[in-house]
Amino acid sequence: MVAAIYTGLRKIGRKIGPQPRCARSLQVLALVSPIPVFVTLITTTNVNPIYITIIALFAGAAASCACWPARIPRIMLAGFLFTGLYFMCFVMFSAVYPHYLFHVWNLSALSGAVIAGVPLEELLFALFYGFMYSNATEYFFTRISAARDHETSR
C-alpha cells in the first residue's frame, strides 16, 4: 500500500533534477551503509537489537540525504507514510490479539513508551525503515528512468 501511495504522490510531486554524477556511486554505498553499521554495533555492544536497527537505518537515511539533498522531502514523505500504515496495522493487530504484544515482546527491555498500545521503538523502526525504503525506491526509479531515456534518445 505504501509503495502504491508513494509512487502516486511521486508522480504528481515536483520533479527533482538529475542526481549529481559524483553522488550516483555514493548512493549505492549509502543504500548498503546500514549493514556494516548494524553488524559493527551488534558484535561490539550489548544494546538491544531494535535500537541497533534504528541507528543503522538512521545512518543509511542520513547518508542518502547527504548524497542527494533534493530528495529529502520524498524521504520524509515515505517515512511518515510507512509509519502511519505500520501504526494502523499494529493497532488493528493488537485489537484482534490483545495479549500478543505482552507475550512476544520483552517490553521491560524497551523504553516503556507506548503510543496507543504501540511501543515507541516500533514506530521509530517503521519511520527509519520508511526513509530507507524511499531511498531504495528513488534509486531504482532513477536507474530505470535513465535507462528508458537512454533508449529513447537512440
Image: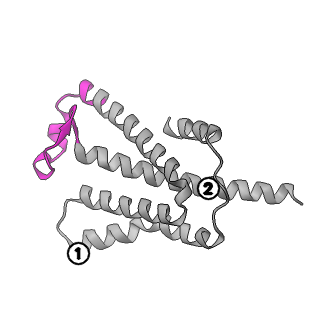
Q: Is residue 105 left or right of residue 132?
A: left
Estimate the spatial distance between the alpha carbons at disc 2 and disc 1, rounded to whole Å. Answer: 33 Å
Q: Where's the C terminus, which quadrant?
A: bottom right
Q: Could you tell me residue 7's position as x and y percent? A: 59, 40
Q: Picture coordinates of residue 26 (x, y %)?
A: 55, 71
Q: Quadrant of residue 19?
A: bottom right
Nearest the viewer among 81 and 100 is 81
Amino acid type at circle 2 is Phe
Q: Amino acid at mark 1?
A: Thr
Residue in the picture at 25% in, 73% down: 43
Q: Which residue is mark 1?
A: 44
SS at circle 1: helix
Identify the residue at image location x=44%, y=52%.
Answer: 131
Residue 53 forms part of the magenta stretch: no
In which quarter of the view is residue 60 placed? bottom left
Above or below for 13 versus 69: above
Between 59 and 1, the one nearer to me in the picture: 59
Where disc 2 sits, the SS reads helix
Mark 1 neighbour density, 10 Å: few (under 14) some (14–19) many (20 or more): few
Residue 72 at x, y percent in the picture: 49, 53
Q: Residue furthest right?
A: 154
Q: Which residue is mark 2?
A: 140
Tell me the magenta residue range. Answer: 93-119
- Residue at the image position 13 percent from the left and 52 percent from the top: 109
